[in-house]
Amino acid sequence: MDQKFFRVPFASNGDTQAIPETAASDGSVSYPSGWGPDYAKDPAADANAKPVEREAMNTVLNAITGAIRQYQTNAYPEWITTANNNGAAFAYDAGVVVEYNGALYLSLAGNNTATPGADATKWQVYIQREATEEEAIAGEGSTQVITPRRLHAGASYLDEQLKTALTPYLLPVGAIVMWGSETPPDGWLELNGQEFDTEQNPKLALMYPDGVVPDYRGRFVRAWSNGSTIDADRELGSVQSDEVGPHSHILITGRFGTRADSYGPQEGALHQCGNSGTSLAAGRIESGEIQENTGSETRPINIAAMYIIKTDLAESENSGSTTPTALVISPSAVTINAGTTRQFAGTVLPAALSADYPVSWAVSDPTLGSIDSNGLYSSTAGKSGTQTIIASLSTGLTATATVTQHVYLTTISIGAIPAELLAGNTYAVPVTYSPTSYTETVNSASSDPTVATLAADGTLTISGAGTATLSLTGASSGVTASITITATEEEVPEIYLQIENNLSEISAGGAVAQGQARNALGLGDLATKDSLSATDVNAVPQASATLGTEDLNTVTSPGRKFQSLTSNATAARHYPVALAGMLDVIKTTGTGIRQIYYPYNTTDVYHRYCVDTATQTFGAWEQSGGDFLAIANNLSDVADAAESRENLGVSYTISTDVAPTDATGYANGHVWYQTEA
C-alpha cells in the first residue's frame, strides 16, 4: 500500500505548546481529555467557548508523527525513560523489544523497570541476525542465532577437523590384519582370492586393478625383501612354493681287518674290534638304519587366523557417527507452578544410536525439585526460582533446559472503590492476592487507559471522564479479576470577578484567560502592545538600511528607502538626478506602483509610475511643481510668451533696436522707436 513516510515529524520547526499530562480544571486541552466540550461551543454566543490552538494541534501531530517515524525507521519503539513517563519508571512485560542507545533489547521479565543493558537478568540484547559460517565455527558471538544451515556447516567443519585429526590413527583402505573370527566385520573381505566390485571400492581397486584380492589361506606371510639380498628379486604379493634347503648326513665306510684275519677283510660302517697282547684281533659287524620323517611339511608350532583386508565400504559405513553427535531436550524452556510436574524428553542424534545411549537426568538445584530417570520433573511446592534440567549421555555429551518456577496465584480479589471518581485524582483500592507467597508477575490492563488504569498494588489512576474495565491477571497462571468504573470531570464552581481585585483573577488565569477576556471586550491584538510597528497599523514600512547599487527599476516593494551615496545615484540605475536622496514606493494597483524621489539638500521632487512591476514598465521621471515659474528663470520658463503678455495686459513692447527696413521684419506686439541724435 501507499504510505506517507515522515522524513521529519510534522511541525518539527513549527510553533508548539506544552500539553498537560493530566486533565486541566478549566477544560483546556490535555492528553487525558483531548479537546473538551468548550472547543465545540460557538465563540460568538458562549463566553466559555475555546478556539482550537494551532500550537496545540502542531504539538499533537508532532508527537504522533514522531512516534510513527520511529517505527518506520527502526521498526521498534524507543525505551520509555522516566522523563517520558511523567517521572515514573515504565514497567515492561516479558518479551517486549525496545531500542536504547542504538541497540535492541528483549525484556526477560515482567514488570521490568530496569534500564536496558544495566541488568543482564532483566534485559538481553535482542538476537535477530543469523550468524555467519565463520561466527558459527568460532563460537564467540552472543548476539547471533545459529540456524539449521549454519549448524550443518559447523558440524561438517568439525567432522572434517575430526577426520583430519584421526586419520593418522586409522587403518587405510587396503590394510591387511589378522582376524580371529570366521566372519569378517562389515566392509572387510577375507583374503581368499575372491572378486570385489571395483566401482564400489575405487581405493582398493588401485591396489588390485583386476578386482581380485590375494589368497592368504594356509600360507605364512614373509616380509618383502624390497632390495634386500635375502629372498632377493621377489615381487610384492608373489607366492613362493615350499622348499627344503641343502644339508648332509655323515656315513663312515671302508675296509676293516687285522694282519691275521681269519675272516678275511671286512667292509662296513659298524665294527667293533679288540686285541689282547699279541693275540689275534677278532672283529664283528653290527648293522643299523636312518629313520624317515613321516610329516607332510616342515613348520613351527602355530595357531590359525584369518587374514582380512579393509575395503572402501568399511570407510563409508564408518563415516557416519558411531557415537551420538547431539542431545536435544524438549521443552527447552518452561514456566511451571511450584508443586506440579513436567515431562521432559531427550532426543539422541543420530536417532539410530538412541537405543545404545540412554539419557541420564539431573537438576542443578535439588531444593527446587527433582527429576526421575524417565525425565519427569517434580517441583517442590512453595519454592520458586530458576531450575536447570541436565540431560547427559555416557559419552559426556550434555544438554540443558530451563525451568522458571513460580508460586502461582489461585485467586485475586479487588475491593470496593470510591463512589465518586474524579478525573485527575488517584485512589488506593484494596487488592487481595492468594496465596500471599505468590511469585508470578501480575499484569494490569484497561479497556480505556485515557479514562483509568489500575496498578498491581491497587493504585487507581483516573485520567479522564468515561467508563473503563480494569483487570489484574497472573502472567503465568491466568487467574484474573476485573472491575468496571465510571469517572467524571471535576466541576469547577462559577467564580465572579471581585471589584477590589482589579481583574487580577483573569491575570491569574494565564494567557488563555486573558485572551478570552480581551475577545469578550472586543479588543484586538494591538491592545497588548507597548509599541506599534508599521505592520501592526498597515503603514508603509521604513527601511533600516541604505540602498546600495540597486537599479531603481528593481526597487518595487512598498516603503520608504534611502540612498546615502551620490555616487550610487546614477542615470544608469534610473535615478532622476545624480544626488543622494529618499525614495518612496507606493502600491497603486495589484501590479502597479508609484516612485517618488526626494534629493537631499534641494526642494526638488521627482515622480514616475510603473503599470506592471513584473515587466518593469516605468514611465519617465517628472519633476513635481511644473505648474509654477521658478524665480531663477526670469520668466524664461513660460510656455507661451504672447499669451502671457495678453494675460498681463501688455499688448505691445517697445524696442530700442534698429527698426526693420520693411514690414517683414516687424513682429506682432512690438513698437520700435529711435532716439534722434
Image: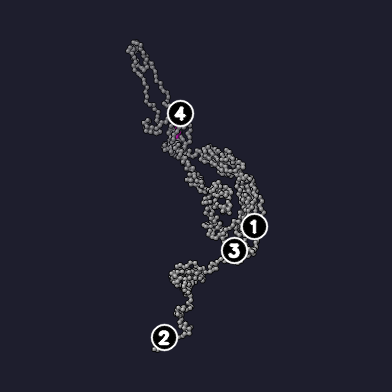
For the residue carrying disc 3, how many other residues have a C-alpha within 10 Å: few (<14), some (14-19), or many (20+)? some
- The numbered dot on residue 656 is 2
Q: Which residue is mark 4?
A: 303
What's under tag 3, amino acid-wise? Gly
Q: Which residue is mark 1?
A: 490
SS for dot 1:
loop
The type of colouring in the image is: one colour
Q: Position of residue 368 (x, y in %)?
A: 59, 41
Instruction: Point out the stretch of residues depicted in magenta.
Output: 302-309
Per the image, is 544 magenta? Answer: no
In this rendering, which labeled residue sits more in front, label 4 or label 2? 2
- The numbered dot on residue 515 is 3
For the residue carrying disc 4, how many other residues have a C-alpha within 10 Å: few (<14), some (14-19), or many (20+)? few
Q: Position of residue 208 (x, y in %)?
A: 42, 36
SS for dot 2:
loop
Taking 470 as reference, is 585 above or below it? Answer: below
Q: Residue at x 52, y 39 (%)?
A: 397
Per the image, is 303 magenta? Answer: yes
Q: Evaluate if marks 4 and 2 touch, with contact meaning CB atoms under 8 Å apart.
A: no
Labels 1 and 2: the sequence-earlier one: 1
Q: Residue at x 39, y 89 (%)?
A: 677
What's under tag 2, amino acid-wise? Thr
Labels 1 and 3: the sequence-earlier one: 1
SS for dot 4:
loop
Taking 342 as reference, is 46 above or below it? Answer: below
In this rendering, which labeled residue sits more in front, label 4 or label 1? 1
User: Looking at the image, which is closer to me, 209 or 302?
Assistant: 302
